[in-house]
Image: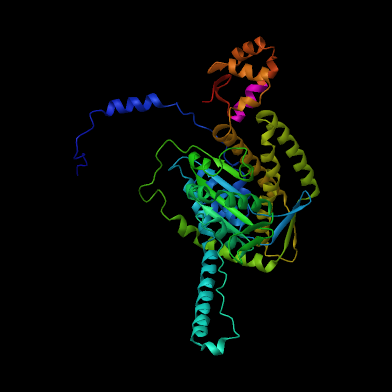
Amino acid sequence: MSIEPKHESLETATLLVEEIENHKGELAKVETPLFPAHIYKILPKFLRETCAFFDQGRDKDVFLASTLTVLSGCMPGVKFQHDGKTYWNNLFLFIIAPAASGKGKMNYGKFLAQPIQRRYIKENDLKKEDYQSQLSLYRATPAKDRLYSAEPLEPEYQYLFIPANSSSASFVETMARMQSSILFESEADTLGNTLKQDWSGYSDVLRKAFEHETHSQNRKGPGNYKEIEDPCLSVALSGTPGQLRGIIPNSEDGLFSRFMFYYFDGDEEFRNVFGSKSKPIPYSDQLEPYSKELLQIYEKCEKWGEVRFSWKPDQENQLQDLYEKLTKYYVRSFGSDVKSIIFRSAIIITRIASILTVLRTWERQDYSNNQQVCSGKDFDIAVALAETFIEHSMKMHSHLLKRDPTDVFPLKKKQFFLALPDSFETNEAERIGDEHSIKDRTVRKYLRDWDINGLLVKLDQGKYEKAT
């Protein structure tokens, strides 16, 4: 059977290929690290088994990050102390990648929590049915017989997931009715468009929710004052770099440091999506049993009540040492305005560890202790994830949202960087460094730092080029 095309071939095909080749390399691909592969072997059973359905690499990472964020909104009552303040385990995640790059795998994290959402929808339907029955009875009662009875009030409906296109007033009302809520949106421009219409209220809600700060909101008319104490909100967003700017216009915006960023450029090759060998069983079918299990975890946390998570003393010492080093390293590389990223990462790492710890408790089915302490495995996983998220945040900071990163360099260091050609070798850099009175050892250190931070691309041993 012939499968020759019925239409004529493009006469300009060769020219088109040449044009594509000429444009290759104009936009430098930004390399960001994957989560360390070994952590997938030591994850709690629920995460280890669900992550196993996805291919190694970005797909698996995106699913894990989104699932952790969804889980952070499905464990009501889990809290911890940090710097003299009480925090809950709610995470903020932003996955950034070009269109059609595979970031849609994050939606399967939301899929796991759909049974919880359906539970609330069913409860809301029953509330609405009961309300309408009471209202009909009230209205059927003669006016003289209902002089001293109040008209039934419409119930407060509850939802786990809050739509991203909600107004700030509606958002606050929905969040106020729940112990913990989730804002999940795989198309970030939906939220971006909402923020354009209602920026001041919405942005403030998100900032305060991360820190569980009391949020007050007043609208015209009687009875429209709303206040939420200790708001608990988890946020999972994905979008393109352009969509990000519609939500977080720059790295100085207070929202930036509140998010875990996961940023990648996507594969250049077309993945195998045809035929029975690509994915014989849909992800949703594979994950269905685990979505039911998550509903059980959610209900167990509701009954468990208040749960206090803490680090072991030696873990606290290790974290203190780690974050002191991270602060010095990244401030030296990027400037003092990145300190907020590191400081809030110390909250994020504790939130991640608390989620992992609750999943371990679920495995053991031992809820006799409301004081939960981090295990060694979960400490290692949390550190590995937090360090990776920090690196992604720094890439976002320098490549997408930040002004010229060399603006924070001392004058001599900036002059040296600007004097380097677009492509060079180490010995040439050392020669240029000598012209600027910079020692060879310092030059090599600069090259290593700039390679890690994305200012340089290491082509081969001793060969570099400036990132565009």
- In the rendered view, tell whether residue 200 sits above or below residue 405: below
Q: Quadrant of residue 388?
A: top right
Percent position (x, y) of residue 60? 53, 47
Percent position (x, y) of residue 147? 58, 86
Main secondary structure of the magenta stretch:
helix
Percent position (x, y) of residue 389? 61, 41
Task: Report the residue at 69% width, 58% height from top.
Answer: 230
| Residue 259 lies in the magenta stretch | no
Query: How are the residues colored?
Result: rainbow
Q: Quadrant of residue 411?
A: top right
- Start and end of the magenta stretch? 445-453
Which of the pair 164/239 is nearer the observer?
164
Task: Mark yes or no: residue 57 visible.
Answer: no
Task: Mark yes or no: residue 82 visible.
Answer: yes
Quadrant occupied by the N terminus: top left
| Residue 448 lies in the magenta stretch | yes
- In the rendered view, tell whether residue 144 sits above or below residue 274: below
Percent position (x, y) of residue 4? 21, 39
Disc tally is 0
